[in-house]
Image (cartoon, rainbow, N blue to C red):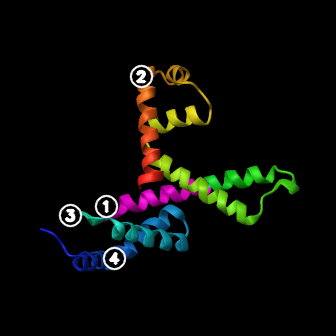
Amino acid sequence: MLTSPSSTRCALGDLYVQHHGWVVQLLRRKLGNQEQALDLAQDTFLRMLRTDTPPVLREPRAYLTTIASRLCGQYFRRQALERAYLESLAALEPEHVPSPESRLLVLEALDAVGQVLDGLGTRVREIFLLSQLDGLTYPQIATHMGLTVNVVQKAMLKAYRHCYSAVYVG
């Protein structure tokens, strides 16, 4: 049975009313910050609103926990990325420090790359990074990780397809 967009919004509205406070408290415990918890709680419900076909939920809190936890993980990764970037900027000579606008653009680009990489499985991501950042060859990666070259090739193909899809299709 197909549901109309208005009934879907109504169901999500009910879900929001029933569980928003609970999601905020869940995130506040994880983040230790009420304002950030409120922001990520909103993002949790927005994520559901943006899905093409919202799921029928028997256990809404389990589903909300999954979405909120993923958003929380992305938040922590972004924070770590920003810290690392700011630490690298601190090591630069003052005349080489980029403008605030350039820093923001770099952080946004790094965040976008991080989100694409988050979509890869752990092993595929590690193989991809060893190849692309460390410059290791497929045989070197295979030896380093105790895999066959064929497994490394398949992982790289999967990573390239995922990156292509994220940039050009998604």
Query: Of residues 37 and 108, which is closer to you in this image?
Result: 108
Task: Look at 48% across and 60% down and name the residue there.
Answer: 72
Choose mark 2 or mark 1, whichever is in front. Answer: 2
Real-space Cα separation, disc 1 to disc 4, in angstroms: 13 Å
Q: Which residues are magenta?
A: 61-79
Real-space Cα separation, disc 3 to disc 2, in angstroms: 42 Å
- The image's mark for residue 150 is 2
Residue kind at label 2, given as amino acid type: Asn
First reached walking from the N terminus: tag 1 or tag 4: 4
Q: Is residue 150 visible?
A: yes
Task: Look at 75% across and 49% down and name the residue there.
Answer: 88
Real-space Cα separation, disc 2 to disc 4, in angstroms: 47 Å
Residue holding disc 1? 63
- The image's mark for residue 58 is 3
Real-space Cα separation, disc 2 to disc 1, in angstroms: 37 Å
Q: Quadrant of the C terminus?
A: bottom left
Residue kind at label 4, given as amino acid type: Tyr
Residue holding disc 4? 16
Marks 4/3 in contact by CB < 8 Å: the verdict is no
